[in-house]
Image (cartoon, rainbow, N blue to C red):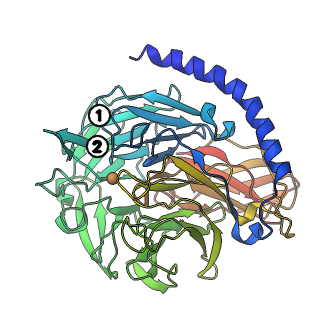
Amino acid sequence: MTKRLPASRRLASAASLLSLSASLLTGLATHTAQAAPWDSFTKGSMGPVVNWPLIPIHVVLLPDGRVMSYGTDAKGVQTGQFIYDVWDPKLGTGTPSHLVLPNTTGTDTFCSAQIIVPASGAVLLAGGDKTVNGVRNYSVNDVNLFDYRSSALYQAPQPMRDVRWYPTVVTLASGQVLVLGGRASLTELSVPTPELYTEGQGWRSLEGAASDDAYGSRNWSYPLAWQAPNGRVFVTTIWGGTYYMDPAGNGAIAKTPLTLPAGDYYLPSVMYAPGKILSLRKSNRALVIDLNGSQPTSTAATGVGQDRYHGSATVLADGKVFVSGGSIWSNIAFGVAYSGKIWDPATGKWAATTTAKKMRLYHSVSLLLPDATVLTAGGGAPGPATNLNAEIYTPPYLYKKDWTGTLAPRPSITNAPTALTWKQGFKVDVSTTGISRVTLVKTGSATHTVDFDQRFLPLNFSASGKVLTVTAPPAAEVAPPGYYMLFVFDSAGVPSVARIVRLG
Ligand SMILES: [Cu+2]
């Protein structure tokens, strides 16, 4: 099977070259033919519904700017066993922009967890689904790796100790990947012991950090967890308790004094600034959690307007939070939120955005792309709609502020390092003077309302003409190693296309 991949890639490359010129022409035609609505500079605009070769239940932005997705077959039926897709946004959204490849690992990757391993840039896929005597939704301890350079998906040398379905993966300051939570089978609910993955060495169970309350039976489904500035891993639960988990040595876990109002597995939370999390809770409540002090604290924030079960929260290139999709009742086509909302951390207020055509409920995703737009996609398997499709959202910051609905000219990064280390000063050449902001956004990896590792960091900089001297983030606890999108903003607040840089 491995011999087949290069052949299909050669075909795809040839097709890509042909389609590139076609998509450029199509792109020009689209832009001249129809301007976006006049209020796009306040609401953004939603692109057309475009086909996707599977329901992208899992999406991950790769170090080369492409997007890997998986979760169903080509008809939208639950299974990650047969195919996965690699989409190149630079080639548009037509069929030739997708590279659909066979999954030869034997693992059904449906409802696994995926994240980029910082050292190699490979995507680690932990766990997945298993069918036993015709009954789905048992789980596996399989671990697979996806190499973006070859687009190949292959078995990792060592599986996890525990089987996991619906686990969470987190990149730690050490560069190791933590997996926690998930379900073992229909009868054995929880997997209370986290495991640590060290590239080249494999897995180690953190017996000292086992907890049913934090990420076991009381909080097993894609538990929300973040590398915190104090070196520990901060965990929130649906029932309200919060925890600091220490991954050092044998592992340890401690409850914090902070208790939150009730949340849900399918209401999103997002780290929108260093050590700060916007968390949507039940009954249209929202909170800002601050991890920068000696103990975590929370303050009430304005709710998003309605509960959006299965919606997504995506931090934009400017640090605002785009909330899209969801409905009032879990995975039911009632009270569907078609229009998104953007939260401004500077004011705490929500602004309405434009309206999507498709409901994005269970198994839908959202992902910030390097061109500062947002991929919103998927939903179904099961659900009221089988969404073998995506809509790309263009946020307000990309439009001219003149009511014409036309895209603003963008600044560009003409030269930037490909690798950074913490605290480092580095030079960035840009196309224009008057750069107003420099930001870093970690490459996202989303599934089931969670975007593992998503985080945003504003960077200090000084400018001399078209040369910026930028300071990298202060520490791995604030910005874990891995891949980040580097954006610059012009004097009108318009972001560049990102350069993807490796930190660490
Ligand atoms: Cu699922």
- Report whether 161 appears left or right of 245: left
Estimate the x, y position of residue 425 in percent, counting from the top left: 68, 52
Q: Look at the image and tell me in which quarter the N terminus lies.
A: top left
Estimate the x, y position of residue 381 in percent, counting from the top left: 36, 50
Amino acid on which the number 1 mark rests in the picture:
Thr
Q: In the rendered image of this protein, does residue 25 appear above or below residue 239?
A: above
Residue 351: image tag? none
Residue 107: image tag? 1
Q: In the rendered image of this protein, does residue 420 appear above or below residue 150?
A: below
Question: Is the C-beta separation of discs 2 and 1 under 8 Å?
Answer: yes
Dot 2: element: loop
Q: Residue at x 36, y 63 (%)?
A: 224
Residue 128: image tag? 2
Q: Residue at x 32, y 62 (%)?
A: 223
Task: Specify which label sits upstream in the sequence, 2 or 1.
Answer: 1
Q: Residues within 10 Å of mark 1 (few under 14, many from 20)?
A: many
Amino acid on which the number 2 mark rests in the picture:
Gly
Q: Residues within 10 Å of mark 2 (few under 14, many from 20)?
A: many
Q: Residue at x 23, y 44 (%)?
A: 204
Estimate the x, y position of residue 10 in percent, counting from the top left: 58, 17
Q: Nearer the viewer, residue 351 or 241?
A: 351
Dot 1: element: loop
Q: In the rendered image of this protein, does residue 152 appear above or below residue 190?
A: above
Q: Is mark 2 within 8 Å of ligand 1?
A: no
Q: Nearer the viewer, residue 416 or 32?
A: 32
Asked if residue 256 can be seen in this view, the reply is: yes
Estimate the x, y position of residue 161 in percent, counting from the top left: 19, 42
